[in-house]
Image: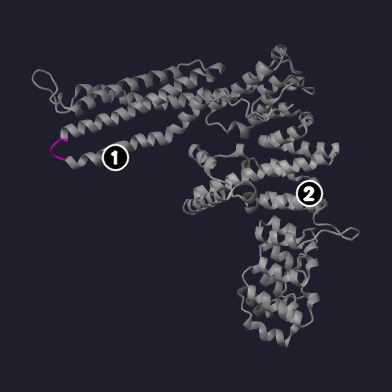
Amino acid sequence: MTYNYVISDLPIYKAALLDDWDSVSGLFEQDPDLMTKQITYWWETPLIIAVGTNRSHRFVEKLLERIVAAGAKEKLFVTSYGGNNPLHYAAKVGNTTAARLLVEQNSDMTRVPNPYGNTPLKLAAWHGNKETLRYLLTVTRDLLPGEEGSSPYAGVAGGDLITLTIMAGFYDVALEIIDLHPNIVLEIDRNGQTALQILALKPEIFPSGSTLGFWGRRLHSLIPLKMSDSEGATQVNILSKIFNKFTAGFWSVIQYTAPSIKNIHKIKGNNNLSGLLVGRICKIVIEKVDHDITWKIFGSAITTAVTYGTHELIEECISTYPGIIWYNVGGFYLFLAAIKHRQERVYNLVHQMSGHRVFAATQLDDEENENALHIAAKLAPPHRLNAVTGAALQMQRELHWFQEVQKFIEPSYEEALNKKGKTPRMVFTDEHRKLLAEGQQWMKDTASSCTVVAALIVTMAFAGAFTLPGGNQDDGKAVFQNKNTFIIFIVSDAVALFSSSTSVLMFLGILTSRYAEADFLYALPKRLTIGLVSLFMSIVATMIAFSSALVLVLQGKVTWIVAPLAVATSIPVCLFGLLQFPLLVEIVKSTYGRNIFHQQNQRKIH
């Protein structure tokens, strides 16, 4: 077989790409078969090529009209080499205009899959084409009772549709699909996953997965969600509706001018939709009154959720069906799995348990004869360990976990031996030997670097106290002693000396520490915190002293230098703050801040 026709039909191929209908209209009149001929190496027709560009809309419209007028309507959906017809291409590229034209010719083609079992609906979701997906949902009907064929909303096809829609981030569309076809949440896709399991894979769409900073969280709480007209008619009066519209308009303008606020609004919308989706799915599953289905769907979802830390989903599942806490998650029950994966938000659900708390805390891993404290004593998975900055703080977090689990277990478990004859404390020491050495090195490197800077400031501040600006009078008094600026110089120089000396002592205390495991919990972070704060104060004081000295020396001569000088002296302070302040905040938060283990809300689980 030769492919010479590919070359001879190039004018048609180029015309389809460029939406140039006029150049080939005459050719189609002379030879109508060219309109449905496979003209490329991959057996694509002119219609498939034009649809695939998602730009040649006039070409598609005119070609469809000409093919139908020529009585060749049955050839509209000729497939390419891969078995995809023009509607499959329209779904892939998001060509809603072409999809409408094609569906008008044959609406039954919306349920026809390609050789790989992919319907246009599924392809639109797979390739993230929301507009096309929404349109196809309105024209793709389900099978009628007794009608032959396969439903696009049931079986693997249905499972693929809902999971691909969620993976694409179309949570509002997923809710629409579930409202129209509730049983779709029970279906399993080609990868053996359910809709609830896919939601568990996406912790970032839940409130706990947000990475917003302080101001981002404040804006998140202020930005309103859009209220539908039906909700407004039933829930608020006319004045409230006017106020809500005004507020919505205000935030729309803000979002248009500030993309970051638009992103926060999107995050809040996803937070709301994720909660609605999880709640709706759990309700549908439990209403089936089928234990096997409930156990399988909820169990597979919490198994994934424990790994990714999606605690809101787990909490909803437990609230809907409390017995799911005893589902076997990779050889462990729920709370042991949370300890293994170091997911504190999942583990914190134990604080919301009532009578079953004691059972959750006394579970045993029969295979290794290990209790919860043995599991807490093991090294955290790398992705959870790296969530904390620096080996020292990682070691501190591991100690927090060990101490927290220690509170909930039976006292006898603290000295219990596993199959290797090791107590939990022995396991902790063995597992964290390398991390302990890395933490020691991290602390020493940080302290050594900061000590050099602090020592230099001590030297400068000490020398500055005896080399006063302007010099001394014959009686030894400073020339500028009656100037207010001179008082500022002396005070700031003294502060620089005392704070830098304190910083040096703290960092020396770190360098000479014994570096025991327990030291990483409080002693070493405390010294590092005091050292960094003192160093920051000394840098600020040094810059103030330097600026004051220059003002005294140049007074009355170069007055315009004051403002630029103030800006210039603030640069080192700002740089230090930008580079070291995040580390300082993390150290203070992990050492003195709120414990990561606490009851997250007032909702009780059994």
Q: Does dot 1 land on a helix, a strand or a loop?
A: helix
Q: Residue at x 73, y 33 (%)?
A: 319
Whether residue 13 appears in this view of the structure is no
What span is in magenta? 554-558
In this rendering, is residue 65 above or below 487?
below
- The answer to which quarter of the image holds residue 562 is top left
State the residue position of label 1.
Answer: 567
The answer to whether residue 426 is left or right of residue 139 is left
Relative image position of residue 63 (x, y in whole percent): 70, 78
Q: Residue furthest right?
A: 146
Q: Amino acid at mark 2?
A: Pro
Q: Residue at x 81, y 41 (%)?
A: 287
Disc on res. 7: none
Relative image position of residue 479 (x, y in whole percent): 12, 25
Q: Does dot 2 land on a helix, a strand or a loop?
A: helix
In this rendering, is residue 216 above or below 456?
below
Q: Are marks 1 and 2 in contact (CB under 8 Å)?
A: no
Disc on res. 182: 2
Please say whether residue 398 is one of the residues in the magenta stretch: no
Query: Looking at the image, what colour scheme do you see?
Result: one colour
